[in-house]
Amino acid sequence: MRIILLLLSLCCLNSIVFAGVKEEISKTIVRVKSGNKYSTGFFYGNGNQIIATLHSIGNPDQIEVFIPSEKSWCSVRLSRISKKSDLVLLNLSECTSANYLKAENITTSTIDTKVFTVGYYGSNDKYQDRDFTVGLIEGKRLKDLLEPSAEQEIRSLGFPSLDTEIVYLKGQLLHGFSGSPIVDYRGKLIGIADGGLENGAAGISWCITASALNYLKTATDAFPRSSLKKVNTLFAEEISASNAKTVSNGQFSFQLIKSRTFKELDATGNYTQYPEMGMYQIMQALDQEGIAYNNFSFDIYLEATTGATIALPKGMKLEQENGLFYATTFDNQVVILIALYETYDVMQMSLEFENMLQAATGVYTWQLDSRMSFLVPYYRPDNVVINRKSFFNYQPNRYLIEALAAKEFTFFGVATVFKESFNFNTYEFTNQDLAAQFVLALQLTTFTN
């Protein structure tokens, strides 16, 4: 009993110490605004310099930082640019800070090390923390983390270097966190958050190693003005406050993080070569029907605390009622229902979700459509389990497609209901193009890595 009490005491002590470290790091960060982009940076060196990411600079001649302790914005000057490591050094002539990360206070990371950051999420003007675990990848360079298609895109962009040394992070970097310091629980800097490269609808989180700051001090690269537009299709884009959309049910919040065509999502997700189960088969079927799905546009929403990612046909309005998220077409002929729950019994929650769908639709005689249903759930390497199923009903004329996903203790259920849209003579949708867009949207709905 004394040993147990001692261990509990040590755990409590560690939590207090960690909280203290986070408080100290929060004093070093700033919010960066450049053009229509918002991101995060931090004081470094001697307190009159700030580190930020190159891809978050929307206008090199118009950069401001918000200093929380001063409650004010301050103009800064772009001093150094490192295209190799996607970093910039900003100088302040009017503002300084007594709280900054020192050049000698950096370290390297080891696998499964617990780390954290403090930054600004999207349009939120209040900083918050995020916890991560250092992940294992074969190799330490950016190219070791990327699909071949993403490598090609970065080469055409011109930065960062594929040989840049990185740290793979298990956890989801929030949009706007680009440039925030990744710190261990001793308060030592291990890297700079790069915001994550897009991986189709989802994303891959990583940071640039802190050693890149040594090169930044003497870097002489010019600002890549011609690459500004293309940056947004490669990196997790920081959406400006005026365009940000967030829908919350009090426990979970989905934020619009990007809008992409399927062609753009496929360029980074590489669904053709490395498809998630079911996606390639659907693409083949659409090709046979002559449907131009590459031009379909989707709004991607992320629930950052869980990594739940929703794809909606562009322009659909995400809403919530009584804890349930939903979206409908203007004529109410297609309805999307979304449920997200923390639970110790994912199987039971899955059954409850399907019972809810029966009650919501008033249909209790659904028949399985095996053509668009998994034979067994798909187990991803990152411990995410996904099952996708389809059903039809004669009277009333209804078609239902659902995705049931679980990640640790989180259940994620999404269902698309079509009303009077199915031809039971041909067993096909009456509007193939419309149905194809919603089928792809559900297939893109997932847990991010």
Image (spheres, helix red, strand yellow):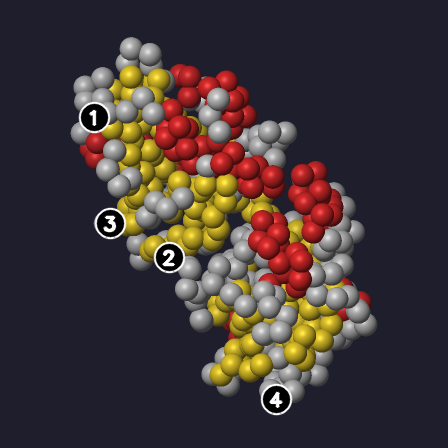
Q: Residue furthest top?
A: 425
Which numbered marker is on residue 246?
2
Q: Are marks 1 and 2 in contact (CB under 8 Å)?
A: no
Q: Looking at the image, which residue sits at the far bottom?
A: 94
Under mark 1, the amino acid is Val
Which mark, residue 94? 4
Instruction: Give the mark toward the camera: 1 or 2.
Output: 2
SS class, disc 1: loop
The crowding category of the residue bearing disc 2, from other C-alpha atoms within 10 Å (few below 14, some 14 to 19, many at least 20), is some
Q: Amino acid at mark 2?
A: Thr
The label number, if any, that marks residue 363 in the structure image: 1
Placement of 210 over or under 202, stated as above or below: below
Mark 3 or 2: the one toward you: 2
Q: Seen in the image, is 82 located left or right of residue 323?
A: right
Horizontal side of residue 53 vs 410, given as left or right: right
Q: Nearer the viewer, residue 226 or 231?
A: 226
For residue 432, side relative to residue 134 (left or right): left
Residue 67 in sight here = yes
Q: Secondary structure at mark 4?
A: loop
Q: How far, Cα to Cα, is label 3 from label 1?
A: 21 Å
Categorize mark 4 by other alpha carbons within 10 Å: few (<14), some (14-19), many (20+).
few
